[in-house]
Amino acid sequence: MKSQKKVLKLEKKTEKARLKDFERYGLKYDDVGKNSLSKKQKNKKGWKALARCLVYFKSHRFGLGFVVFLSIIYSTISLLDAMFVERMVTYIGFLDINNSIKYAIIIAVLMLFTPIIIWGWAIIMTKIIQKVIKNLRIDLIDCVSRTKASKFDEVNTGAIISRVNTDTSTVTDAVNLTLNYLISILSSFAFTVYICFINIWLGLLLILSILIFSIFENGYQKHNYKMAKKQRLVADRRVGLISEIARGIRDIKSLNIRGNVQRKFNENASHMENVSVDRTVGNNAWKVCRRFAQVFFDFGIILLGIYLLTEGQITVGALIVTIFYKGQSMHLIQFLADVREAFGNAKVSAERICEILDDKDYEKEKFGTKSIFDPKGIIEFKDVDFKYNNGATVFNNFDLKIEPNQSVAFVGKSGQGKSTLLSLIPRLYDVTGGEILIDGVDIRDLSEDGLRELVTVVPQTPYIFNTSIRENLKFVQEDLSDEEMIETFGEDPDEIRQNKKEK
């Protein structure tokens, strides 16, 4: 009975969360992630995807190893600095000027090495990160270009743009932040050990505070991870909507739907505002709680330090160093939490990246190996069936044969399959039944170049890249010379466009 009540309570809580997601962020259950995976399985899937993306760092392992070495050197210098500060302060208390100056000089010399280490670290990491981002994006664009065209009927361009631009940076930022924080983490750990060496009771209180802070950080990370995923889904829609508005601005104006489009964008902007505010408010609530706990433990360490000083168990120098450097030790959990947050975001991004890299969600086109070297131009449809992904039937047992040099016109209402019929020939869509033959060869047996160099389709709304006409022509034929362009057009194609603009 108790188990049943617990299930009902959980279902009610889940339904309430779904309703909030829809009302405040415009997200449906499927958007947030409807699947049968357990939390452990989801976590495993995220780490597996991240591991796949981190393979791109493998070729830079020697550079990364040198960065780790620099981090260890920097941390060692920081620890030595703390130890020498403690001795310098002690000698100052004894009015021993000579030893005080000696340790001050040693500290100054050590500190001269730190900017050199940071400079070398930054140069190496910047080069590595930029190369990994470049390679990731190249592979993603390659996979997008090989994805079946039917996939783009169900995914908006914003999702693609966001994954190529934002998610690749998020994955590499996690590695960059980890190595950047490695210096701080090692230094914080060393300071904690050093404070335990100064006095075990101060060390134990410091370790206790770190453990309690970890509880607050755990709650913070769970909230932030969940909201980060929702924020990205809303952001994907925003990027897609902006892209569609920019691409279809002429149709929007001619159809007089500017008001409707504006309302759609306003709605998305409100959803983006809501998810950003909710994420920030929740995160800051956890940070406030953590700050209260930090003030409490800071006060406790000061009181304990004063008591130990009066009992003669520590020196004034040791107490000052403990108070001065305890912040470094306390930040250990913060540094680890930031790294955990970065990898949490990176796991989400890695999953989204791997969806494109894999065939499961973004199924890639598969071609044969044949080529037609002396094409005659016989196109034949044999018992062709075709359905869209939504199940709508377009063709059923369709037969057609087009002879060489024969002109064929297709007439019919909008949406009855005229453009789809042409899209089947270069395999922008694959038939669900039957076969299409060119000169007696099934187009599925032809290689990509072997098929698409045979077929040219001029769409109703021709697309050109946002560059010069000359560059657009060179997309088709890279070695096209200016003389060949002028021979074809009669004059420079870009000058033709410029003259039209001036008129």
Image (spheres, helix red, strand yellow):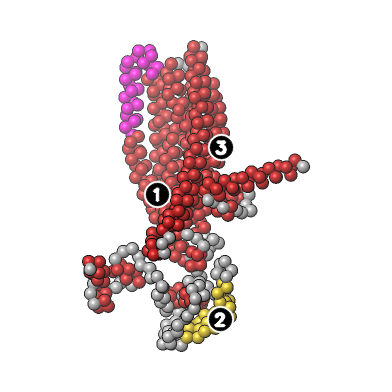
- Callout in the foreground (3, 2): 2
Q: On the image, numbered disc 3 is attached to which residue? A: 219
Q: Nearer the viewer, residue 193 or 10?
A: 10
Q: Quadrant of the N terminus?
A: top right
Amino acid type of the residue that numbered disc 1 sits on in the rendered structure: Ile
Q: Is residue 108 magenta?
A: yes
| In the depicted structure, whether residue 366 falls above or below residue 384 | above
Q: Earlier in the sequence, mark 1 or mark 2?
A: 1
Q: Main secondary structure of the magenta part?
A: helix
Residue at (57% x, 73% y) in the render: 393
Element under disc 3: helix
Indicate left or right for 128 with 154 as reference: left
Residue at (43% x, 51% y) in the render: 166
Task: Magenta stretch: give its range.
Answer: 89-113
Q: Earlier in the sequence, mark 3 or mark 2?
A: 3
Element under disc 2: strand
Q: On the image, numbered disc 1 is attached to which residue? A: 129
Residue 432: x and y in percent read 57, 74
